[in-house]
Image (cartoon, rainbow, N blue to C red):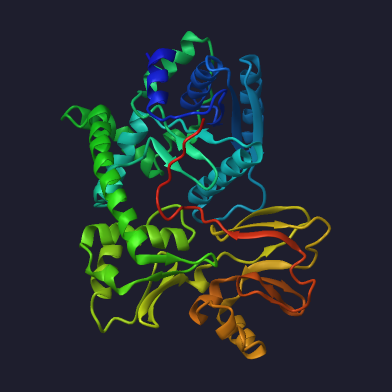
Amino acid sequence: MIDVSSFGQRMQRLGPFESRPHLAVAVSGGSDSLALTLLTQEWARARDGWVTALIVDHALRPDSRSEAMQVKRWLKRQGVSTRILTWQGEKPANGRMAAARNARYALLEDECEKMGILHLLLAHQMEDQAETCLMRLARGSGAEGMAAMSPLAYARHVRLLRPLLGATRQSLKDYLESRDQDWISDPSNDNPSFERVRVRQSLPQLARIGLSAQALAASADKFQRLKRYLEDEAAILLAKHVSLAVAGYAWLEPAFLDEPLEPQRWSLARLLACLGGEGYLPAAHQVEKLCLAMADKSWRGATLGGCRLLRHQGRILVTREAQACQAPLRLVSGQGGLWDGRYQFRCSVGKGRGLTLGALGSQGAQQLARLAPELKTNAGVPFPAWASLPAIRDARGVSALPGLGYKRSNRSLEPLTELIFLPRRALTGSSLLLS
């Protein structure tokens, strides 16, 4: 059974932490996340810190709200502060699970930013890691995929910590029983229509031939070491050959194509994920195919990972593919968010009525070039990158394009107090030292 002492050792490997740390824990109400919350609470208390539990109500099931309230009552009795975050708006008919996951992480990360919390703990455990390994293996993944989930990752405003990757599901249930704490069982965890559930149900059979959850998780840990090495190599290549513009596009120097294929592939995958606003990297075999194609002098351009790449002015321009951008958002007074996984924005109080924020688009770029031709030379942004820039529109059309410094009138930019390129995935890994 896991205990506070062994949990403390796991947390030490994920440090450093500030004095009197404030940590957030993502809580579903299942045994894993409730055990993580109580363990984290004990760990934080010993350091004069505290924990906030964040419960996401996806509003996908009729009883989701009542379950969230039940978890909140449980944690209140344990002395844990809790906030319930609700996924608002219409839910997609297709790809609902992926959309729910993206919404969940966005809600959690935004709440951490609002509260000034630097560490968000996630309750993935050993069997989760083993299941991820098997799913990646079935897809023919390389080193990165087989590394599965990282114990430490960086989001836009917060560190993502997974201290339970070495703990079994049963050990967490045993811990909760020792604390006399019940939990909620999600019926979707037994639904074989989901790939992860089918893989989970196969684990006992695989364990009989030596492919136990522990063995699979140990393999993931070894791949993590290889991944860290390749990440470092990729960071060096990115620093040498990539110029990232604050408007949200990048230049690749021709010498990038002379680098060894493997770190080149890793570098390009991270660049595409960053500029494409995606949380995940594009498939390794697709990126490798693109790297090989780019080395051919006859290559002119391609699209991958929601990005467009083309030879331009002696270099390779990498920009967001306009057609893949998120649909325009209606601006709401005093509210903000992350548009297209790339731009953090906030609407001014009392402004935003009748306005939208969305991609300029190819047609809009052509119209603006005719309306203000001086922007082509004065703005410093290559024309092929215009179409994916965020534009403010009203009933008359484009009223402002902050990335080009264009505004129809002196008041056109007033609706936004903030619009900055802050993608969901950073170009390289980060480090953070707190005192």
* 236 is higher (above) or lower (below) than 245: above
* 109 is higher (above) or lower (below) than 269: above
In the drawing, does residue 343 fall left or right of residue 334? left
Residue ranking furthest to the front: 435
- Residue shown at 38% from the left, 55% from the top: 281
The answer to which of 202 and 377 lies nearer the viewer is 377
Task: Tell me the quadrant of the picture where the N terminus can be found.
Answer: top left
- In x, y percent, where is residue 52? 61, 27
Residue ranking furthest to the left: 209
- Residue shown at 30% from the left, 74% from the top: 254
Q: Splitting the image into 4 quarters, where does residue 372 fall?
A: bottom right
Q: Splitting the image into 4 quarters, where does residue 299 fall?
A: bottom left
The answer to which of 383 and 16 lies nearer the viewer is 16
- In x, y percent, where is residue 8? 42, 19
Instruction: Mark yes or no: residue 55 visible.
Output: yes
- In x, y percent, where is residue 65? 66, 34
The answer to which of 209 and 343 lies nearer the viewer is 343
Disc tally is 0
- In x, y percent, where is residue 81? 65, 24
* 128 is higher (above) or lower (below) than 175: below
* 403 is higher (above) or lower (below) than 128: below
In the drawing, does residue 61 fall left or right of residue 235? right
Instruction: Mark yes or no: residue 58 visible.
Output: no
- Residue shown at 54% from the left, 72% from the top: 388
